[in-house]
Amino acid sequence: MSARQWLVIALLALVVLFGAWFVPRGETAAFVVFGLPALAFAFAALRRRRTAGFWSGVFALLWFSHGVMVAWTRPDERGFALAEVALSLVVVAVASLPGLRARFGRRR
């Protein structure tokens, strides 16, 4: 599987996570703020937009920070928050993979 496919899977998993976390609690505004960018980046990556990986990595740093903050301050939401942290780390790693391969790959 390519890095782009893994990126799309991780972003869609974030959308599902945010939907399961915020929508049942009636926090649809939070779902819009956190879930819609992930959905937009997933569609951009599917359409092979060149900047989709970069912007999803930038937003993943925000999702990571949010997840760490919630995990520390709200024990009842810790499971969702740690899943957000893990998925945001996957997004950063997968979004960086093509650049790392280009930089450190074998020279011909």
Image (tube, rainbow, N blue to C red):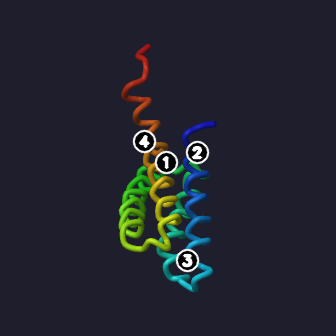
Query: From the viewer's perspective, is 51 left or right of 27?
Result: left
Q: Are marks 3 and 4 in contact (CB under 8 Å)?
A: no
Q: Is residue 61 left or right of residue 95?
A: left
Identify the element where label 3 is drawn. helix
Of the image marks 3 and 4, the number of the one nearer the N terminus: 3
Quadrant that contains the N terminus: top right
The amino acid type, in three-letter code, at marker 3 is Phe
- Is residue 103 left or right of 45 when viewed as pictured? left
**Does the CB distance between marks 4 and 2 fall below 8 Å?**
no
Q: Position of residue 5 (x, y in %)?
A: 61, 44
**Mark 3 closeness class: few <14, some 14–19, many ≥20 residues within 10 Å:** some
Residue name at image x 48 percent, y 50 percent = 91
Work out whether residue 43 can be spotted. no
Question: Mark 3, mark 4: which one is toward the viewer?
Answer: 3
Name which quarter of the figure residue 71 lies in.
bottom left
Q: Would you place residue 102 above or below residue 97 in this image?
A: above
* The C terminus, quarter of image: top left
Going from N to C along the chain, the mark reached first, 3 or 1, is 3
- Disc number for residue 6: 2
Decide which of tag 1 and tag 4 comes sooner along the chain.
1
- Tell me what residue is drawn at x 52 percent, y 64 percent: 79
Q: Amino acid at mark 1?
A: Val
Q: CA distance from mark 3 to mark 1?
A: 21 Å
**Residue beneath label 4, please?**
96
103 sits left or right of 29 in the view: left
Q: Amino acid at mark 4?
A: Ser
- How far across and how far down the image is residue 29, in percent? 50, 82
Q: Which mark is residue 80?
A: none
Residue 90: image tag:
1
Disc number for residue 22? 3
